[in-house]
Amino acid sequence: MKRTTLVLSSILFLATSSFAKDEPPPRLKLVCFALPADKASERAAALFNQRLRDAFSSASGHELIDTKAFLYRGDRDPRMNDQHQARSMAQEGQEALDVMEMEDGIAKLLKAKEKYQKSVGRFGDGKEYVNLMLQIGAAQILAGKVDDAAMIFQEAAMFDPEVQMDPAKYTPAMLDVLERGRVFAASQPLCAGQVKSVPDAAEVYRNGVFVGVSPLAFRNVPEGTQYLRVEKDGYLPWGEQVEFQAMGEEYYQAKLDKASRLKAFQALLKDKILEDMNESPPPFPIVRLGEFFEAKRLVLLKVKQEGLEIKVDFLFIELDPRRKLHFHSGDTFRLNPDHNLILNSELFQKQVDKYFKDQAKQLFH
């Protein structure tokens, strides 16, 4: 009996050991920057910075550090309280609906929606907000308030024209009301507007989707409520719920508050960080930037714009041990206003996205 027990224990040990060996290695923390070579290159660098991080956010074996959140970590922001309260109210509302307390549940969900609207700069891509609106609309239909549900679903479709509801979870009537909301959103007249920021060369998002860098001119924005968010490394995000009108052009000014770690971050950038990028091992100013963000690896781009031409130097390093993993220089992008190939255009962003996807494929696969 003892021998049998020992054998079973040994088999179990070997099995668990083999499982442990099959576990994937820990992901390496990665930090990414596209920095301007000079003042004239700031907007181009801001665009490359955002697209770089978006492309490398799913880099195999790596965990991308959220540099903006790192720099304002611990800073007081009342919008975070609004967001926490919104989530709590949404949970309470769902619990009320689960026991068929429809009026109470809907009222709590609507209060949660109001709290989310106060935290615009903090609700990211807005998926939680859209899902909440779908939840409210579905509950209103069950309560016989179809007109109210139609309004909520229109709002959801205005925020995300591709919003979907799972047919396995929602009734055909709910799906039909949402489809009518999408038709309504798509039929709205188109508007124009401009967003400027202090400081400039900041990332601009509309309804959770990146649209370009400031100063930014909007075109073809549906009339009605839109949610703007403006972000930049070293600053708290700015956000506002705004109204676009078809008969005029809207102007918005985003003033970003400084994060507590901005000065320390700026000091690192002043340390001749873009000089001698091809040295091996990497220069200490570059290494210190990565270490400040507690990273294991760093991607650094030098972006220089001269007229309609943008040149990029690309560096990928490991911090400990200090070694260069990859470097190349002189990658060139050309703008062409005659073909709408301008900095904030979707066409140019697609070119930049392809470049970074090719780099990621080469480095991480």
Image (tube, rainbow, N blue to C red):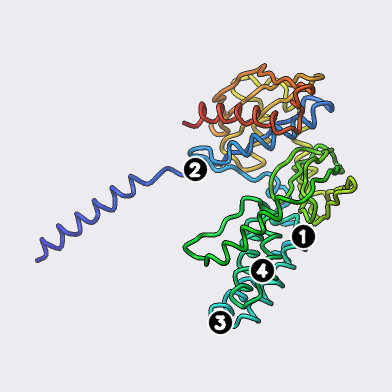
Q: Quick one: label 3 or label 4, which is nearer the N terminus?
A: 3
Secondary element under disc 2, as helix, strand or loop, is: loop
Q: What residue did someone put label 1 on?
A: 77
Q: Residues under labels 4 and 1: Cα distance? A: 32 Å
How would you rate the neighbour count of disc 3 (Cα within 10 Å): few for under 14, some for 14-19, many for 20 or more?
some
Image quarter where the N terminus lies is bottom left
The correct choice, above or below, for 177 with respect to 340 in the image is below
**Nearest to viewer (mark 2 / mark 3):** 3
Residue 284 or residue 353, whichever sits in front? 353
Residue 100 marker: 3
Q: Quick one: label 2 or label 1, which is nearer the N terminus?
A: 2
Q: Tell me which residue sits at (33%, 45%) in the image.
A: 21
Q: Amino acid at mark 3?
A: Met
Tell me whether the residue at label 1 lies in contact with that at label 3, contact meaning CB atoms closer than 8 angstroms: no
The correct choice, above or below, for 313 with respect to 208 in the image is above
Q: Residues under labels 2 and 4: Cα distance? A: 44 Å
Q: What residue did someone put label 2 on?
A: 27
How would you rate the neighbour count of disc 4 (Cα within 10 Å): few for under 14, some for 14-19, many for 20 or more?
many
Secondary element under disc 4, as helix, strand or loop, is: helix
Residue 197 in picture, x, y percent from top left: 85, 43
**Nearest to viewer (mark 2 / mark 4):** 4
Q: Amino acid at mark 4?
A: Ala
